[in-house]
Image: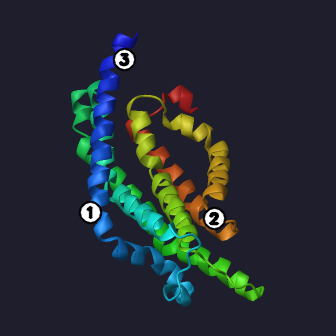
Amino acid sequence: MFEELKPHLIELRKRLFISVISIIVLFLVCFGFRNYILEILKTPLVEVLPEFSKHINVIEMQEGLFTTIKVSFFAAFVFGIPIIFWQFWKFVAPGLYDNEKRLVIPFVSFASVMFALGACFCYFIVVPLAFKFLINFSLNEGFNPVITLGTYVDFFIKVIIAFGLAFEMPVIAFFFAKIGLIDDAFLKRHFRISVLIIFIFSAFMTPPDFLSQFLMAGPLCGLYGLSILIVQKVNPAPKEDEK
């Protein structure tokens, strides 16, 4: 059994190696532009709390260094998304038909665009609204919010990656439908439980306020509907299963 799996493990190691090397190279480039990247990350909070741009708090001596390294890796991961998806497709391509292998460019492009859409939606809409709500609530209650650089960056990276990956739902549905694991009847049958899972996922991945959770859960429910339409085209259920 191990001999049968050995070629697949070697291929997986090769694809992971290329992805990791690409991320490392991109990290070195992004580290050179770390100040510009950090300014972009701080913009949503500065718009709500202008004094954050003047006095950036750090608690530990190494926090500034580790945070800039983390920001550079985050930027390298975002820019390396197309490479990661490309290597993933190269890994699964040997098990596909020739006509399916030609879908590599649409797959990589669509997956990269969906991740970018999720990240942009979070950056331009979710993060500013969430920060405005949470900070204004603290100020109205008489609290003085002291936000450290490390805490803010950790929170920002978490929600951006969460939205980017969540927006990959149609891509994942397309892939599973293509290999025959799911059909549109399956997605329709599990619609209610999927909506519940979406709201639970949104509660874990967003700030603890209903606005942020709804801003994530709402688009995901819409993407679930889009996934049903995509799967219906790729792998429609037999008429008896549909009934």
Q: Is residue 109 visible?
A: no
Q: Quadrant of the C terminus?
A: top right
SS label for mark 1: helix
SS label for mark 2: helix
Cα distance in 3D space between marks 1 and 3: 36 Å
Which residue carries the number 1 mark? 29
The residue at 54%/77% (across/down) is 128
Q: How is the image coloured?
A: rainbow
The residue at 32%/51% (across/down) is 23
> Looking at the image, how many numbered discs can be counted on the residues?
3
Does residue 186 lie above or below 64 as drawn? above
Which residue carries the number 2 mark? 214
Q: Which mark is residue 5?
A: 3
Contact (Cβ within 8 Å) of mark 1 with mark 2: no
Does residue 162 lie above or below 149 as drawn? above
Q: Position of residue 130 (x, y in %)?
A: 61, 74
Q: Earlier in the sequence, mark 1 or mark 3?
A: 3
Cα distance in 3D space between marks 3 and 2: 43 Å
The residue at 57%/62% (across/down) is 216
